[in-house]
Image (cartoon, helix red, strand yellow):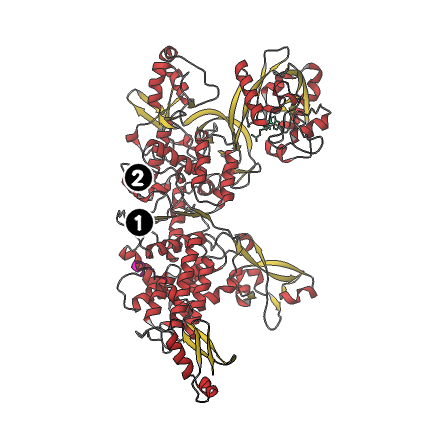
Amino acid sequence: MADYKFRDIEQKWQGYWKEKGTFKAEVDPNRPKFYSLDMFPYPSGAGLHVGHPLGYIASDIVSRFKMLKGFNVLHTMGYDSFGLPAEQYAIQTGQHPAITTEQNIARYTEQLKNIGFAFDWDREVRTSDPSYYKWTQWIFMQLFNSYYDLDADKAVSIDSLVSRFEKEGNASVKAVCDEETPTFSSSDWNGFSEKERQEMLLRYRLTFLAETTVNWCPALGTVLSNDEVKDGFSERGGHPVERKKMMQWSMRITAYADRLLKGLDKVDWSEPIKEMQRNWIGKSIGAEMVFRVKDSDKKIKVFTTRVDTIYGVTYLALAPESDLAAELITEDQRKTAEAYIQVAKNRSERERMSDVKTISGAFTGSYAINPFNGEEIQIWVADYVLAGYGTGAVMAVPAHDERDYNFAKHFGLEIRQVIEGSMENGSFPGKGGLIINSGFLSGLYMKEAMEKAIEFLEEKGIGKGKIQYRMRDAIFTRQRYWGEPLPVYFKDGLPYLIEEKDLPLVLPEVDKYLPTEDGEPPLGRAKDWTYKTADGEYPLELSTMPGWAGSSWYFFRYMDPKNDSVFADKAKTDYWGSVDLYIGGSEHATGHLLYSRFWTKFLFDLGVVSIDEPFQKMINQGMIQGRSNFVYRIKGTNQFVSYGLKDQYDTSAMHVDVNIVYNDQLNLDKFKAWRPDLADAEFILEDGKYICGAEVEKMSKSKYNVVNPDDIIERYGADTLRLYEMFLGPLEQFKPWNTNGIDGVFKFLRKLWNLYHNASGEFAVSDEKASKEELKALHKAIKKMEEDMENYSFNTSVSSFMICVNELTALKCNKREVLEPLAILISPYAPHIAEELWSLLGQAESITNATFPEFKEEYLVESDFEYPVMINGKMRSKISLPLDLGKDEIEKAALADSNVQKWLEGKAPKKVIVVPGKIVNLVV
Ligand code: ANZ
């Protein structure tokens, strides 16, 4: 048996690729490009487990396949290296986060290199590197210097806005800005002080400082974005999160809401992910209108998507957080209403929304006037109204809205039907029902009624059509140390940008990574954290950027990672364009994947890149779950009973490290050595073995089911790991890691190796022509692989390789004509062994430079046909002949057949009828 020395082979080729720069990517206008991107990892202290490389292996296979197909492939890796865990660790140990980060990166890099990825490592980026975050800061500055012009439907320089203000004020400017922005004339503007002007501009800038209600996490001491909060707890660490008002930087992502929606139609992503983004953006078309409060000059503004139901409004409802609600409470309602508000405020919005059973609210005692019919309607405060959506107030139409209906039923409020079909008779009117008994809207259908109602609102100056988005502007600052400093200083309490030549603004040293005594962020501890300008020295911003800043544009930096004069050269970003295949987890659907689309669109508006969608095709790999093993301890003893016998005893199950279990069989010596308390463990075996129980769970240290790729590589090699990860099942599916099947994959590679070697282990490939069967086995696999690549179906290709190698082994095939293309075929999956075989075949260059074998249909078509030969209507023989044989030759062959000759008994047939591909008929 030939010896497949995977360790030597893998080291040799990893060294070769590095030395020769095999995967170096450079712009080459003569070749089509392919940009293959993985979501870059946060380098955590735990290192990689086998779940992490799943997506990387898939994208590596596609990358290598594309290389074989003649593409110029950009395939890179880097680190999203700012973030909370390194900082939490720094707080506990005093260790600078930069040091831990460096160590973790070194470990990740080593682990990744062992797997043999075709990355161009010279392009590695790290978001925490000043040479990188210089450009993150630069992008921030461009956002600060821009506003969103609705006429141009793009970001435009703030300088041009200033010149418009100087000439014509802001009345004619259509721009995305603060809701409360006042109207001013050019003379107003020209009369404004510097401070007033800057304050006004902050209402327009794409990144701005404003008092905002934020998610404040006291345990982490920082603000979190909506996507970092899950059910009222921080995503990292699971700490409680509260709502709090704070001065914060935000990004005006809402300006891009519509383009973010439209762009989804252009990209090839899975429908569920697109749907998650659509829901997150949450576009609603409706109207905003004002209700006057009776006997008062107070007004209540509501947002409604169904202004056509205006005659069915029987009460208004405000969010409990609303300041107005408190002001509207009358003396006789004070006790109940205030008590209710107190309780409601202590429940988070999320809690209130998810609790559908408890309906609570209170009447304020005040009334509003319906401007359409002058009716007086009660004003309530209600749990189901969200403070942060729309205007925080609802015009309630119980007959046609479910939540209003439940509320009205509970409190005995009027339910008035104004559309055919109503909640009352169980038929919620779908959109488009006929409007009945509704003043001048009667007899209309929804769309027309809405238009007419909006016309009325606009005429009276009490409302207008309005598009509302659920998405909020993105909070951009964190009160933490380990992030990019904002390139901002403060003069007279107002923010100004530092000069571009002073970038990067490098993160300063601090004595501790904790807030200051006065509750300032950690940067408050830095000495001389100030900015010197010609007219003085000013304090710098103390907050840092959030985790998503650096990851929102890294795909551009890979194209030109060392450029120091621009974030990436335009000629390069033009050449590489959008990412052709992005593989990563679906958990980033509403965070990273929205923010990076936003920044790309912004950079597009600036004209510094030519694409406005960063990721053309995306695949979300499923998680690899752990497969835990259990041993069963007889209670009160140190005796462990094998799985099959455990029911005969009173036992308790205990997780055991999966790394000392093989095919569910426990290695007893390793078990005893695992922990001191197990040194004297005793066992009750079945058939001389200790069999463990097994269960699929999340892969986690505490469940002892973490499998480290290094161990698998040590035992079987990287090629086996790569093939095995793909073999586990469809890429997108969640699936358990089960080491049990890995032997089979390893044996497959050994079989492959043996095809190229003789029984004494010598390389032995013949130059003889391959047989039809051999070529057929090969071309079936070629065809399958091409189809599978189209569909990103990796597991099925592995199976087809296995079938092919089995068939070739059975045929004892050792023909170069088959084995050369076979090595190329397998090389994307198992690159090391493929390189070795390729060089044994006498090739001087890396197999990456080979050309993918051309599939030839002719090898798959059946070439022979078994002709039935009939004599006087009875079948007397069967002969196998090539399908392309002519009639005469078929006749000759039939007459020469020994069976036929026997039946003919030496006579010549009277008639011979040949139907090619079907039958031969003889009449004697
Ligand atoms: C009257 C009405 C009648 C409504 C009807 C719906 C159906 P989407 O589609 O999600 O945008 N609403 C408005 N602001 C709210 C808030 N802050 N908290 C809770 N609900 C709020 O939903 C918009 C609809 O949700 C609005 O249209 C409003 O109820 C309610 F037959 O107004 B509607």
Q: Amino acid at mark 1?
A: Pro
Give residue 77's position: percent from left, percent from top: 37, 48
Q: Nearer the viewer, residue 425 or 840?
A: 425
Relative horizontal placement of residue 659, taking residue 581 as reference (left or right): right
Q: Residue 411 lies in what quarter of the image?
A: top right
Q: Nearer the viewer, residue 188 or 780?
A: 780
Q: Which mark is residue 568?
A: 2
Relative horizontal placement of residue 404, taking residue 604 as reference (left or right): right
As drawn, which residue projects farthest toward the bottom?
905
Magenta span main SS = loop
Relative horizontal placement of residue 387, taking residue 731 as reference (left or right): right
Bin the neighbour count of mark 1 within 10 Å (Cα to Cα): few under 14, some 14-19, many 20 and up: some
Q: Amino acid at mark 2?
A: Ala
| Looking at the image, residue 78 lies above or below residue 338 | below
- Residue 62 at least partly seen: yes
Q: For the residue with label 2, is its CB less than 8 Å from the closest atom of ligand 1?
A: no
- Badge 1 marks a residue whose secondary structure is loop
| Looking at the image, residue 497 lies above or below residue 371 | below
Give residue 796's position: percent from left, percent from top: 47, 60
- Alpha-carbon distance for marks 2 and 1? 20 Å
Q: How many marks?
A: 2
Relative horizontal placement of residue 366, taking residue 66 as reference (left or right): right
Q: Quadrant of the N terminus?
A: bottom left
As drawn, which residue projects farthest toward the front?
910
At 32% from the left and 52% from the top, the residue drawn is 71
Q: Label 1, on which residue?
A: 32
Q: Which mark is residue 310?
A: none
